[in-house]
Image: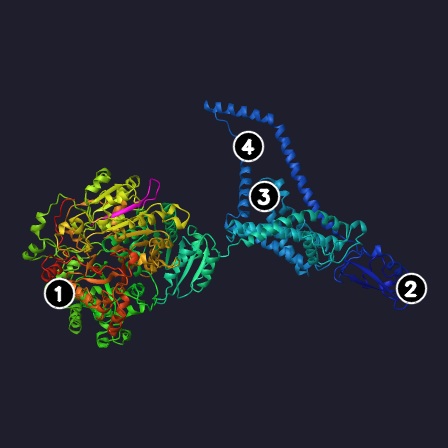
Amino acid sequence: MANGGGGGGGSSGGGGGGGGSSLRMSSNIHANHLSLDASSSSSSSSSSSSSSSSSSSVHEPKMDALIIPVTMEVPCDSRGQRMWWAFLASSMVTFFGGLFIILLWRTLKYLWTVCCHCGGKTKEAQKINNGSSQADGTLKPVDEKEEAVAAEVGWMTSVKDWAGVMISAQTLTGRVLVVLVFALSIGALVIYFIDSSNPIESCQNFYKDFTLQIDMAFNVFFLLYFGLRFIAANDKLWFWLEVNSVVDFFTVPPVFVSVYLNRSWLGLRFLRALRLIQFSEILQFLNILKTSNSIKLVNLLSIFISTWLTAAGFIHLVENSGDPWENFQNNQALTYWECVYLLMVTMSTVGYGDVYAKTTLGRLFMVFFILGGLAMFASYVPEIIELIGNRKKYGGSYSAVSGRKHIVVCGHITLESVSNFLKDFLHKDRDDVNVEIVFLHNISPNLELEALFKRHFTQVEFYQGSVLNPHDLARVKIESADACLILANKYCADPDAEDASNIMRVISIKNYHPKIRIITQMLQYHNKAHLLNIPSWNWKEGDDAICLAELKLGFIAQSCLAQGLSTMLANLFSMRSFIKIEEDTWQKYYLEGVSNEMYTEYLSSAFVGLSFPTVCELCFVKLKLLMIAIEYKSANRESRILINPGNHLKIQEGTLGFFIASDAKEVKRAFFYCKACHDDITDPKRIKKCGCKRLIYSKMSIYKRMRRACCFDCGRSERDCSCMSGRVRGNVDTLERAFPLSSVSVNDCSTSFRAFEDEQPSTLSPKKKQRNGGMRNSPNSSPKLMRHDPLLIPGNDQIDNMDSNVKKYDSTGMFHWCAPKEIEKVILTRSEAAMTVLSGHVVVCIFGDVSSALIGLRNLVMPLRASNFHYHELKHIVFVGSIEYLKREWETLHNFPKVSILPGTPLSRADLRAVNINLCDMCVILSANQNNIDDTSLQDKECILASLNIKSMQFDDSIGVLQANSQGFTPPGMDRSSPDNSPVHGMLRQPSITTGVNIPIITELVNDTNVQFLDQDDDDDPDTELYLTQPFACGTAFAVSVLDSLMSATYFNDNILTLIRTLVTGGATPELEALIAEENALRGGYSTPQTLANRDRCRVAQLALLDGPFADLGDGGCYGDLFCKALKTYNMLCFGIYRLRDAHLSTPSQCTKSKKSSSVHSIPSTANRQNRPKSRESRDKQNATRMNRMGQAEKKWFTDEPDNAYPRNIQIKPMSTHMANQINQYKSTSSLIPPIREVEDEC
């Protein structure tokens, strides 16, 4: 540049350019200094001296090092002198000057404090004197200087507090300011990255350099923020030495110097990278980082990266500048990112050698950096990798899919529990399951469980977390979930602790979202009471607690009343596919019944106005469906499940029916059925949705349709009542003429509907009262098993004759009750038990000790003490086990009659013979020690040993007439003897039992695979599923694992759980559970019409086909004929049969006797199925065939089945006087079910 001169070699000619030598300056950017290249365009003699001087300047490199780049617009130092020291001096003066002032202030303050120490004592003495003077009434004025000092201190404190609030993250302003400072610091660092491509020092015009202007604005803001921090700091000295303060000292002042000098020095601006250390704090202020692992990870990354970038900036500065003592001649051209690369390979000890430091300052820095950087690299990098590797694989959040529901499953999540749940929940027999399952557990799944999730990835997702953490609940979108299911560990050693964990889960979920529907598993019955303490727990809104102990013992108790019922009910609510077997064995017919499940469907309007027996027969014959119950809504909108209601109840519009069918598609027939379109159709598969319009029924609510028959307010028909407006009454009249609903007369209107709405009794004629002894109306709580004949109660004369001073039932009237008895009064010694000839009783063999977990024997006794049995029908219960354990259970058993205890052990044959186990109706084997053993194959050792012990016992035939007349499972009236002298619930057995194999036994198992040890002569594979094994199919074994299916069944239809609980518990209701939660025991109550009405409800019984009203169908009869006859004649609902396994294989003659069609016969054969009409083929799938080992030893069951063993049919029947009268006419010996007497024998 002509006018710039530089390096002392300017042109000597006048005007700087004339004929002198022309100088050209070239910039070497990589070396960061300039050199002069001398060239002579035309040399003349007059300018030789200047040319020589120019040439001399070229050969002086030391002078070249002082030249700096300049621009034509900015006049720089004519000598080209570097000014880096001015920038550095501004920072050093600011730092050390401020440090000196702070130290000087502290020194003076200390000296002032020491010098004024004596003066302070004098002031204290004066204050004491002033205080005494004020006490004397002399007040002295306060010194004006002290007031000024106090005011000054208050003002400084206020400013300091204001500054502290401004820079803290406790307020919104503080958080915004902190985040803004961090963002501007990163912006300043980015500007440094941009300027690093320019020379270290260069002349810049502030008014034209945009990046310099932005950097200036940033640093002005940093200066103001520094002032706030300084004011708010309590210790000024430590504040001055902070890292952030040092960064400000070496970055803010040089910017102001660069504006003053019109030149820029890259200098120490790389220190802005140290602000990255605060990155984790900023993210915490923004609530982005919440976990300790994430905070730690960000801290390690920010420290590592900030140290790395800062060190790279220092290497970039010294290598591009050179050593000052070498006059900056040993520099090298390195970009900033090459320095970053150099630092990384140095820290990792790789050192390729392609880039290295040449300056002495650079090498000296590398020596110290290797020590610290290597240590940091070796410690930080592995920890960062570990934190990233340990990051939860399933730590994301669930994204809800529009139009698709999802449920959350938590609790005990293992491979076994999840596989059982998914197998039932996603079963193909269910109608399209458009529900996504979200599992939430705090432990990551193992490889097997992870593979299971991947196999169902379209409908299953897993997230790691805990339902006790609200953040995890938000991740799985619990507020939008359709339900939350909580699984329990059935095999835990401490059931109470497991229940407490699940209750805490319920509390956490309900606290987060009170409206969520929760279905939880509970192990102990007494722990269900704690759920009632949760304010948002509401069973009416769908919340359910599936108590495994309650249902398990309830199933076993029902097997004591009807052997094999536990197996049939368990198969009904379990989703299992049909397995076709060609061989004509017991498995073929058993699996046909196993493939059936319980479904619900709304009934077609074609059934409106028909009675339940009529609809049930129509569904059975026409639709090939077995309906066992309906959901009835009374006038007050209260829903109740009615099992086998009588013909007085008419089907309403929108009635929900309970069906037994093989899949959900079959049940749709009940909804699509139309009498006009489907009346002549014989193939039920052709019954599909038709185009008939049901405008009347679809537009009217149930309540209006019931009012159309009669008015609930006045008990008269709507034509005659004054409760409705004329317009509405006119519309009703028109509708009635067009669509007559039922044959309910006006006179019967008040009686029928008020009985369901107000539960008011109707009256009987004196003749009926005298003959029947009085009947009862329906219970007034929901849900209950209802009595469904015309609702009748005792007349006034009988009510007056009731003994109101004797408490025979509990306060709800659902169970037999007696005054609490001391356990010593029911204990029998071995000799006393032998002298008390027991027959037709229930023997409960129980293993337990003082430390065992309580089983909850109350749940076993309550179904056997249901009030719908007569007192003389109650089976005596004898417990055989440890008296220490039974004392712990006795508090819940002391209110039940006919209970005895024999202290001993179930493994003692002497104890078993003392209780006449060969004459019992059922032997139940339970254990309270099963979950205390780690080895799963040994969990059931006590129960298995007891079962094998009983089966190996031998008995003689010398007991006498009592044993010969001993009967089990004979319903009242079926025996030829007096009902007071014989058991009532069974069929005729052999005259005597000589071997323990023939004793009816049901054994509780924990581990399903242990079922193979119960029968030593069976052909079951050890890998066979429980429901396919012979002991389970025969009803001699029961495992709690079969109850897992109730979780899915309850979610899809909560009425299923209500129905199952009603069947197996003997009448337990939510109201009764609340009462037990208050007192932990049943409370006795006096007999009233309302409580006595609760006795009148359905029950399950087994009826023998040997003789009685169904004797004509006992040998080769048809199941269809049996079903229709029982339903039409006796209002009984036969929904299963219980018969011998492969009885047709015993003798060839028995095979040829079974030739009748349209039923399941006493001896099944292939010919029967072939001869059955087409319209009855699908009915076979709904006949749950149950097998039992009876007669001789089971090892001979293929060839030596007893000839006098007959099948049984399991029936649900209401306690109907009308039914009893009909049977009296059919068979004059005795009634099938005698009327319940209002005054029973004393307990």
Q: Which disc, if any, is residue 47?
A: 2
Which residue position holds label 1? 717
Q: Residue at x 45, y 61 (%)?
A: 399
**First along the sequence among labels 2 and 4:** 2
Q: Which mark is residue 940?
A: none
Earlier sequence position, callout 2 versus callout 3: 2
Question: Label 4 sits on what residue type?
Answer: Glu
Q: Which residues, given as a range, are shown in magenta?
A: 840-854
State the CA–CA distance, disc 1 to disc 3: 89 Å
- Residue 669 placement: quadrant: bottom left
Look at the numbered disc 3 and give the secondary structure of its residue. helix
The image shows residue 36, relative to residue 929, as above or below, that is: below
Residue type indicated by callout 2: Ser
**Residue at the spot of label 4:** 146
Residue 924 as seen in the image, left or right of residue 164: left
Local secondary structure at mark 2: helix
